[in-house]
Amino acid sequence: MNRHSAFVILSSFVIRHSSLKCPVLTAEFDYSLPPELIAQTPAAERDQSRLLTLQRSDGRIRHGRFSDLPGHLRAGDVLVLNDSRVIPARLRGTKAGSGGQIEVLLVEENGVNDWWVMLRPGKRARAGTTIFFPDREGRPGGVRALVVEKNEEGLCRLQFSGAHDLTEVLDSIGEVPLPPYLRRDEPKLPVDDRERYQTVYARPAGSVAAPTAGLHFTKKVLAAHGTVPTRRADCANRQRRPTGRASRHCGWHNHRARAGKRGRRQSGAPGQV
């Protein structure tokens, strides 16, 4: 990090761009994170999560709280916030005939009720398979999907029916997809998880994973940022109809669908609540 002289906080970050003199390689962000050190529940107050800072001038490391962030900002800094809202992109269904359980993660919308998805277990769902989806209480919801095809990336294309537009019923049949490193005894998330896995500034729907560093911001921290002569940039665009993919972090508004062909899928970045 000191070679590039950048102040970065995961996916919500401040960049002092004038000092970036060479490309930042993703391999430089690879690190070992033992599972037992990953917090399984968030801090009672969002901004009371821990914050580690590196003083580049002398290499000192300081430990504080996220609420200290405004004190690290300087005039001219740009605070980039991903304000895309996480959609209930995880669906739990049953396979027609056998009744086998199948988990679906929405990845990219090709058109109304036409989605590329990740399936688990994927081998059980061949082209022509029908999947039924109950609501979150387990009651028949009337929504179903037909497996149309699979691509080389291992994603399946589903054609949904039983709803005028799948995005309009996701709140009743879908779940906000927590990352796999957050363990829960029950598959259905409590209300607190659904609320805390959104940033306080989330607006347009479209992401299937939260920008995890942004989860620590509170309205108080954002208000304190306003007292420093810095700039704020929100990275999600505004469109009435979500088109293209629902990305891991940036929102489906930031991508355009390729006609007849899927683009490259984004990979998620490791984070911690």
Image (cartoon, helix red, strand yellow):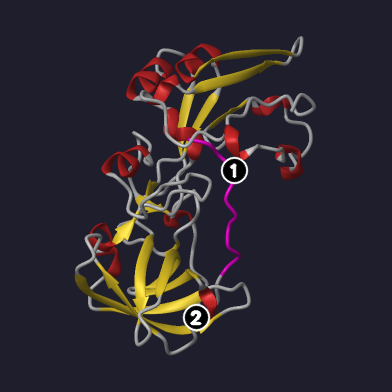
Q: Is residue 56 above or below residue 165?
A: above
* Dot 1: element: loop
Estimate the x, y position of residue 68 in percent, counting from the top left: 49, 14
Q: Residue at x 44, y 57 (%)?
A: 252
Q: Callout 1, which amino acid?
A: Pro
Label 2: how many Cα within 10 Å (few below 14, some 14–19, many 20+): few
The quarter of the rendered structure image containing the N terminus is: top right
Q: Residue at x 32, y 62 (%)?
A: 241
Residue projecting furthest to the bottom: 128
Q: Say if the magenta span includes residue 78.
A: no
Magenta part of the chain: 263-273
Instruction: Please give the residue where the numbered disc 2 appears in the rendered image.
Output: 124
Determine the main secondary structure of the stretch shown in magenta: loop
- Residue 92, x across and y down, in percent: 36, 66
Residue 80 or residue 116, whichever sits in front: 116
Q: Residues within 10 Å of mark 1 (few under 14, many from 20)?
A: some
Under mark 2, the amino acid is Arg
Image quadrant in which you'd find residue 3: top right
As drawn, the label of residue 46 is: none
| Number of numbered discs | 2
**173 lies left or right of 256:** left
The secondary structure type at the circle numbered 2 is helix
Q: Position of residue 19 (x, y in %)?
A: 72, 25
Describe residue 220's horizontal placement relative to residue 3 as left or right. Answer: left
Q: Is residue 117 above or below residue 226?
A: below
According to the picture, the residue beneath numbered tag 1 turns out to be 270
